[in-house]
Image (cartoon, rainbow, N blue to C red):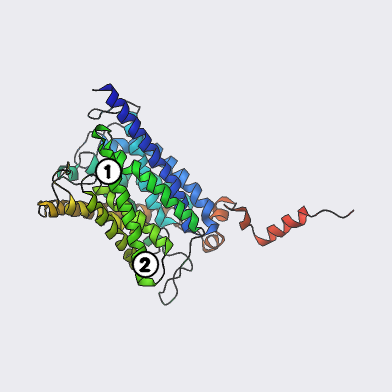
Amino acid sequence: MDDTLFLMNSLWVMISAVLVILMMGGFILLETGSTRMKNAGHIAGKTILTFGISSIIFWAVGYGLIFGEGNALIGFSDFFYSGYDIEGISLSGAVFFLFQLAFAGISLTVAFGGFAERAKLSVYLVFALFFSILVYPPIAHWIWGSGWLSEHGKQDFAGSTVVHLTGAMAALAATILLKPRIGKYNKDGSANNLKGHNQVFTALSVLLLWVGWFGFNAGSTVSVDAGFFGFVAVNTNLAAAAGTVAALIISWTVTGKADVPMMLNGALAGLVAITASCAFVDTWAAVVIGFIAGILVFYSIRFFESRRIDDPIFALSVHGTAGVWGTLSTGLFATKELAAVGKPGLFYGGGFEQLGVQALGVVTCGAFAFIVAFAILSIMKAVMNGLRVTEEEEIIGLDMSEHGSYGYPELLQPEQKLNIVSNQRPQAN
């Protein structure tokens, strides 16, 4: 093995792993900005805590379940990873492990979007454990760990299915079982817009996620050889840009207003969609994939809201609908030259075979993630005396009810403010 190439590959993937882990900061800002101020500290704190839990579980069993020797369904070796190098890859085994750990953490974070503003903190902790063992690893093994979908040539370069669709289907299970937030729907079924408290946070979060996605997609080359990671990065950027523009145009056209949150969701949808195909399609196709994702996310959000499915972070649309489209898109646009996995897409002479494999992956992985997550949460609901905080606690906000303090000092109760002011007044002589 070329020592120089080994070191350069290791450095590149290490940088990419750091970028992906920093995406957690983007998700913190996205979720806090998209929800109400009374829950901001809770959302930020649980994101860090659950990433810690998922990291430990990935080290103990997750990595082995995905990449360990086993059968077409699951791995059975390499538990409690201890830093050894890995055969078949020209980079540090520890760096590869950390890179894969970051992906598992992102998928869990996507799933928790469906819990926002109404789930108990204890539910996050327990579900993080089971998701990291029973939901994410089997799907990752099927596609990335030489499992049965890999044998069929399933194309998912960086995780439109493995990471995003898996997380979104778990989020769907949570939203169904938790039911809508107080005040979200009226008796006639019409929806109220429970607006997030900080649009600047959400805009900054999208920029951070956009940058982090270069680690997500381009880093998945796990190599600097021939500089192919640059091509993947270009496709990633073009899809995000197209999704941004498309979502703004469609929202402006339909509603008469240039909706900023919708534009931001369009950018994320473009990123999610291109994640499967970024290494398999030409640049013009990346623009098309991102643009269609931006339109789909607009209508998907409206669809779920009309069905009284309360999805505060729009995880179902951004990561679910866009994840489905991104996965299917390789079956249309994968070129003969770039399809290192599977076969060319429909528009490049491959017929419907690859599209069929992609559809098979969507259906089986989506169904597995939803059914297993729903079963886990149903059992938790029975054992833990419910998944949801009380009505009073939800109205007060999870910052105070779960943690005893607000994420923002100015959110003190009025009587507390008066006490502080009176205590600070100078005393008369």
Q: Is residue 372 visible?
A: no
Q: Residue at x 27, y 54 (%)?
A: 287
Residue type beneath disc 1 = Val
- The answer to whether marks 2 and 1 mark residues whose Cβ atoms lie closer than 8 Å is no
Q: Which residue is mark 2?
A: 251
Tell me if residue 274 comes above or below residue 292 in the rendering.
above
Q: Earlier in the sequence, mark 2 or mark 1?
A: 1
Residue 276: percent from the left, percent from the top? Answer: 25, 48
**Position in image of residue 129 (x %, y %):** 39, 44
Task: Please state the horizontal and vertical placement of residue 247, each as a whole percent of the image.
Answer: 34, 62
* Rendered image: mark on residue 232: 1
Quadrant of res 241: bottom left
The local secondary structure at tag 1 comes to helix
Q: For the point 55% across and 58% down, which residue is it?
A: 38
Badge 2 amino acid: Ser
Q: CA distance from mark 2 to mark 1?
A: 29 Å
Q: Check residue 177 in the rendering and tell me which mark sits there, or answer none.
A: none
Q: Residues within 10 Å of mark 1 (few under 14, many from 20)?
A: many
Camera-nearest residue between 249 and 121: 249
